Image (cartoon, rainbow, N blue to C red):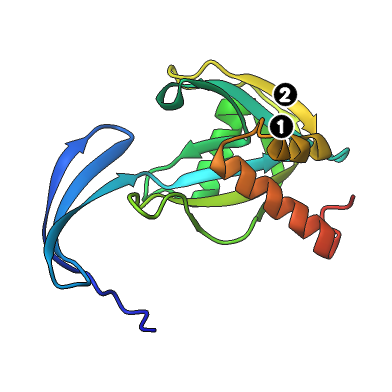
Amino acid sequence: MSRTNPWKTLHSRMIYQNSWIAVREDAVIRPDGAEGIYGVVEARPAIGILALTPEEGVYLVGQYRYPTNHYSWEIIEGGGDPAEDALQTARRELEEEAGLLAASWNELGGEVHLSNCFSAEVARFFIATDLSSTTAKPDGTEVLDVRCVPFQHCLDMVHRGEITDAMSIIALLRLDYLARTTGWPAR
């Protein structure tokens, strides 16, 4: 099977744009040769941070998520300017949301496309260790509850459906795989 792009874009137009997302509509020739339209949501690059303690604690952030009308427990997350270095975005989000600084950083796996059927949003993940406290600076749109939760309890929350955020699930399961296959971080 060919891995080349079977779609042809005729033209694009921006339908909607705000500080967080943009929605564009592309006029296309579909793989079957018919003309059509395709709506694409564009978003700033997403960053997820697993802030880990030496005792295998993971910092989670609880917050109300307006789009889902749901209170959500998540890893520390945020979006960055496409021109901003991903690690710099991670450092900023860790400080803003959790009031933490990290002396050690490791990337956790490669890029993830969060919902590639209608969105071009890409996420990257980092592990932050050697943590120290500072003053949190949440955005005006955030009312956050920050807690340090044992890693195994976080996994249990994923499997019980208590953590429903895709980025959090991906990061926690990647860390679990890393721990089981390489022993890092030490368990």
Answer yes or no: is residue 96 visible.
yes
Q: Quadrant of residue 147?
A: top right
Disc 1 on helix, strand or loop? strand
Answer yes or no: is residue 137 visible.
no
Q: Quadrant of residue 174?
A: bottom right
Image coordinates for residue 37, horizontal then vertical, percent: 15, 54
* Tag 1 residue: 59
| Residue at the (43%, 19%) spot, across then down | 141
Sort mark 2 into few (<14), some (14-19) or many (20+) by Cα contacts within 10 Å.
some
Of residues 114 and 79, the one nearer the viewer is 114
* Tag 2 residue: 147
Instruction: Name the kind of residue labelled 1 in the image.
Output: Tyr
- Vertical placement of 118 versus 100: above or below? below
Q: Are marks 2 and 1 in contact (CB under 8 Å)?
A: yes
Of residues 2 and 46, the one nearer the viewer is 2
| Residue at the (74%, 32%) spot, across then down | 132
Image coordinates for residue 78, horizontal then vertical, percent: 49, 37
Which residue appears farthest toward the bottom when viewing the image? Answer: 1
Q: Quadrant of residue 92?
A: top right
In what quadrant of the picture does the N terminus appear? bottom left
Disc 2 on helix, strand or loop? strand
Image coordinates for residue 88, horizontal then vertical, percent: 52, 45
Instruction: Name the kind of residue labelled 2 in the image.
Output: Arg
Image coordinates for residue 177, horizontal then vertical, percent: 75, 58
75 on left or right of 187: left
